[in-house]
Structures are given as structure tokens and as C-alpha cells.
Amino acid sequence: MRPREKEARPQVLLVEDSPGDIRLTREAFREANEAVYLHVATDGVDAMAFLKRDGTHVHSPRPDLILLDLNLPKMDGRQVLAHIKADEGLKMIPTVILTTSDAEADITYSYNLQANCYLNKPVQLEAFESLVKSINDFWLVKATLPQKKPAT
Amino acid sequence: VNPLKEGGAPIEVLLVEDSPGDVRLTKEAFREANGSIRMHVAADGVEAMAFLRREGGHADAPRPDLILLDLNLPKMDGREVLAHIKEDDNLKTIPTVILTTSEAEADILKSYQLQANCYLTKPVQLEAFEMVVKSINDFWLTRVKLPQQAADEKEGETV
């Protein structure tokens, strides 16, 4: 792979606490699009620190896409979503819910808070890989995303 | 392949688009991609809001599962329609996809700020346009978990 400027690569923030799921997501993205730079936050507090560049995250890039699990330690994904969508600086970052929950209450709640879309994490490995590929194909290839830096 | 909703109901899509040519192409491309979509068309922003609110001649309009919204429309433009949808507690959960020829950064940013669910640029070439429609179908109508029918309809059933 030719070296690319780090900033030009699609920056994806995965908010996920399961080490197994993190690894699978990383591998599936590597397969689907090797340019993707995957950042990981393992709980909701860490995710918000990354997005707000607090603490050790002062140099973190602004993600082009957020993949957010709902069940997370410290601050759960519903709260993270509410914080993102209440923040004028963050709300335009597409936030995709990626969770094993298919509870109607979670789906409705997420769309109410203006999650950009809701995806069920399949248990089977092949289906999971295919889902990551479809996230890449739709969000990072077809969709037009907002520029990194809002016009000032 | 999961073309039908639970219970076998068709997927209701509202296309808000004023160009008859684009309406026809979108209908044909969806027909190709997924046989169980019922496509409704509103040719301007005022009609789109009337459809969504079941006003005027739209008293029997179904609640769409997905809205495809052009930005440049007569009477009320797509930016205003988007703002109205996302300010309405009953309508805001309906995924609203911007489908427009505009590549202006201001339009992209404004749409995401107003909480459009995503922004797609309409390609001029026919084949590329068909691919975009196919990807909308493959992602939004196949992969994505859409919210169930509106609370208001459920209320109607239980009362």
C-alpha cells in the first residue's frame, strides 16, 4: 500500500467494548477498504473524550463516520448518541448504530435522537463481514459526507 | 433478500422530486432493484408536507418507510421540507435521504446539520444513477433496521 497522507484517509471511530468485535470489525474493514483508518473507543466516556479532544485525545482527528454500539460501560451508547446530536460541532458526523439489540424501543429511541441509521450486528462471521462491507460501500463510497472542517 | 416488511406489506417510499424525467428514472430503477416497493411522488415541497401530514387529498397516505428528498423544488424547497420533517416529533424518525444534483458544500453541511440521514449526489449519467438507486435499496431497504410504523397509527389500533 502506498503511503497516504493520514488526513486524506477516511477516519472511522468505532465505539465498542468487546475486544472480539473490535478485532472482527478491524479485519472486515481491512478487507473492504484498506484506506480506512479505524479508531477505537471502548466506552462512552472515552468516545466523548475522543470527539471533544479532551485528555489524551488532543490530536485525535474528526471522524468521517461513527459506528456506535448501544451497550457500553461507563456511559452507554444512547447517552453518547444524545451528546453527539446535541452538539452543534458534532451533530453532522454520520452516526451509525451497530448493535446486537433488535429491541423496537432501541430502534425508535435511536431514530428519535437522530441516529443516521440503525444496523443489527449479525452473530455469524460471514454476515458480519458482509455488513461491514456494505457500511463501507454506502457511507464511505456512495454517500457524500460533510467536509472535515465546517466553514468558519 | 428481505424485500417485504413484516407481515408482507410493501415498503412505502416517498420521492420528493419535481423533474418528471427523474421521477420516471427513479421509479424504473427501483422497479429493477426491488419489486415490492410502493413509490409515492410529491412534485413540490408543499405537496410533500401535505402527504406526510395527510392533509388535503392525502388523507389516506401511508407513512413512508423512507423519504428521498431533492433540494431544489418549487413552492417549498427541500431544505425547508427537511427542517419541517426533523422538527416534527412524529415525522423525525423517518429516514430522510437527500438525493440531489447539488454538490455545494453549503448544501451538504446544512443538510447534515438539519439531521438528514444521508446525502447522495444524483449522477447525471444513467448507469451511475441506476447504481445509486440500487445502493439505496441494498443499504436502506435491505440492511438497515427501519423504525416501525408511527406511534399515532398504533394508538389508532388500540383506542
Image (cartoon, rainbow, N blue to C red):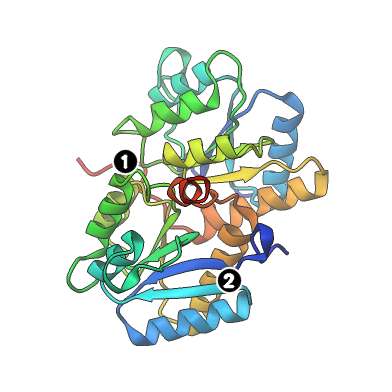
Q: Position of residue B58 (x, y in %)?
A: 34, 70
Q: Which residue is mark 2?
A: B134
Q: Do dots 1 and 2 share one subunit?
A: no
Q: Chain of mark 1?
A: A
Q: Which mark is residue A149?
A: 1
Q: Quadrant of the rendered structure where residue A60 is? A: top left
Q: Position of residue A135 (x, y in %)?
A: 60, 51
Q: Quadrant of the rendered structure where residue B120 is? A: bottom left
Residue A146 vs residue A142: left or right? Answer: left
Residue A17 vs residue B105: left or right? Answer: right
Report if residue A4 is visible in the image: no
Q: Chain of mark 2?
A: B
A98 vs A53: above or below: below
Q: Amino acid at mark 1?
A: Lys
Q: Residue at x 45, y 44 (%)?
A: A94
Q: Position of residue B85 (x, y in %)?
A: 32, 53
Q: Are marks 1 and 2 in contact (CB under 8 Å)?
A: no
Q: Residue at x 69, y 36 (%)?
A: A100
Q: Residue at x 39, y 76 (%)?
A: B41
Report if residue B107 is visible in the image: yes
Q: Quadrant of the rendered structure where residue B123 is? A: bottom left
Q: Position of residue A142 (x, y in %)?
A: 51, 61
Q: Residue at x 60, y 52 (%)?
A: B144
Determine the secondary structure under disc 2. Answer: helix
CA gap between label 1 and label 2 equals 30 Å
